[in-house]
């Protein structure tokens, strides 16, 4: 039962952490570079809408689940599977870095952008964008690197878990069908002459 719980928690931690890493990475190499080429009003409006839309059940399950499942995996591997502990701990620390950066920097910047008002009512869109964009992008890269590293650590922990819990192939008992018994050291292996094609062994 404990092995099943270890496997499930580690799989869930890897999956949710990977989904978060993919989300932040997509912002780093696609979303924000694309919006950087847009006008001020387009940028502000797009980010305000994204920040509203992203607060949904799927995001919260992944965001909080990555932390909760990694903690669960760590606790379940304390008594057995200690080979995995350094990698799970590393993943937990790295994910915590992402969690803190998001909560302390990116979310407050999102709130600040929302408080600026509707794009059509903002007198100086360029100033609002300037106060948000560079800092948000920089810290998004930081949390992306931490999150991807956490994902990699969990993948390796999962590989080690598979090796530790793998069942070795059974060794055939001496004399059993399919078992090959080696000759004692220094003793020649008896030569067995093959029967001619179509003739049963031993027939003359």
Image: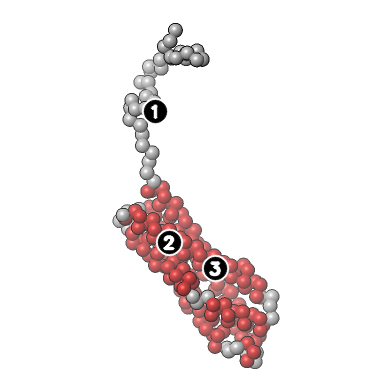
The disc, 3 or 1, on the residue closer to the chain's N-terminal end is: 3
Relative placement, left or right, of 98 versus 136 is left
Q: What residue did someone put label 1 on?
A: 178
Q: Quadrant of residue 10?
A: bottom left
Q: What residue did someone put label 3 on?
A: 23
Relative placement, left or right, of 91 versus 78 is right
Residue 63 in sight in this render:
no
Report, in whole angstroms, how far the alpha carbon at label 3 lies from the one at label 1. Answer: 53 Å
Label 2, secondary structure: give it. helix
Q: Quadrant of residue 72?
A: bottom left
Nearer mark to the viewer, of 2 and 1 = 1
Q: Residues within 10 Å of mark 1 (few under 14, many from 20)?
A: few
Report, in whole angstroms, how far the alpha carbon at label 2 lies from the one at label 3. Answer: 17 Å
Q: Residues within 10 Å of mark 2 (few under 14, many from 20)?
A: many
x and y percent of residue 62 in the render? 46, 68
Q: Are marks 2 and 3 in contact (CB under 8 Å)?
A: no
Q: Are marks 2 and 1 in contact (CB under 8 Å)?
A: no
The residue nearer to you, when weighing 196 against 4, is 196
The disc, 2 or 3, on the residue closer to the chain's N-terminal end is: 2
């Amino acid at each position: 039962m404990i092995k099943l719980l270890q496997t499930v928690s580690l799989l869930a931690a890897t999956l949710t952490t990977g989904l978060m890493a993919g989300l932040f990475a997509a912002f780093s190499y696609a979303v924000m570079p694309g919006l950087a080429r847009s006008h001020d009003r387009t940028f502000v409006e797009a980010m305000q809408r994204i920040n509203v839309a992203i607060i949904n059940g799927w995001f919260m399950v992944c965001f909080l689940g990555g932390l909760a499942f990694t903690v669960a995996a760590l606790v379940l591997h304390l008594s057995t599977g200690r080979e995995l502990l350094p990698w799970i701990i590393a993943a937990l620390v790295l994910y915590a870095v992402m969690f803190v950066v998001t909560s302390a920097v990116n979310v407050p910047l999102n709130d600040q952008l929302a408080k600026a008002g509707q794009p059509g009512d903002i007198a100086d869109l360029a100033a609002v964008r300037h106060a948000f964009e560079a800092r948000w992008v920089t810290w998004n890269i930081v949390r992306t690197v931490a999150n991807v590293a956490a994902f990699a650590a969990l993948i390796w922990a999962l590989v080690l878990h598979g090796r530790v819990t793998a069942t070795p192939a059974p060794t055939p008992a001496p004399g059993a069908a399919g078992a090959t018994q080696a000759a004692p050291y220094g003793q020649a292996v008896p030569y067995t002459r093959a029967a001619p094609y179509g003739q049963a062994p031993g027939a003359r």
